Amino acid sequence: DEEKLTTFGSDTPLGRAGQPAELAGMYVYLASDEASYVSGGVFPVTGGRAL
């Protein structure tokens, strides 16, 4: 709803929701040959919020 939209992401240390361009790099990396040896890793793209 509209109220949730205005506060979405405000609970992160950065105080805002991540933008697609800020998340895209991790997706591109994981889909690339550079990540061919990556297995079972945790890559928190959370704006500083602990998992």
Image (spheres, helix red, strand yellow):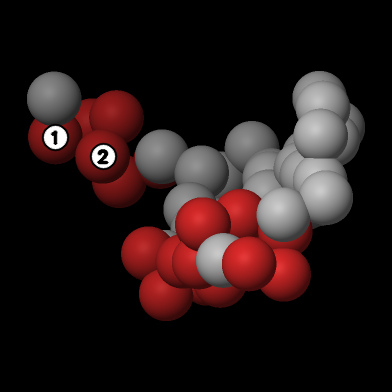
**Which residue carries the number 2 mark?**
5
Q: Please indicate whether residue 11 sits to the left or right of residue 44 in the image.
A: left
Rate crowding at label 1 as few (under 14), some (14 to 19) or many (20 or more) other CA atoms within 10 Å: few
From what the image shows, is residue 30 above or below residue 44? below
User: Disc 2, disc 1: CB below 8 Å?
Assistant: yes
Q: Position of residue 22 (x, y in %)?
A: 52, 71
Give the amino acid type for the residue marked by disc 2 in the picture: Leu
Q: Position of residue 46 (x, y in %)?
A: 68, 45
From what the image shows, is residue 25 above or below residue 44? below
Which residue corresponds to the image point at 82% horizontal and 27% vertical from the top-left? Answer: 40
Q: Which residue occupies the extreme left position in the image?
A: 1
Q: Please indicate whether residue 3 sits to the left or right of residue 44 in the image.
A: left
* Residue 35 in sight here: yes
Query: Which quadrant holds the N terminus?
Result: top left
Which residue corresponds to the image point at 42% horizontal and 74% vertical from the top-left? Answer: 21
**Which residue carries the number 1 mark?**
2
* Residue 42 in sight here: no
Q: Position of residue 15 (x, y in %)?
A: 63, 56
Which residue corresponds to the image point at 51% horizontal and 44% vertical from the top-left? Answer: 9
Q: Please indicate whether residue 35 sits to the left or right of residue 3 in the image.
A: right
Q: Position of residue 3 (x, y in %)?
A: 23, 32
Q: Quadrant of residue 26?
A: bottom right
Q: Quadrant of residue 51?
A: top right
Disc 2 is placed on an element classified as: helix
Give the amino acid type for the residue marked by disc 1 in the picture: Glu
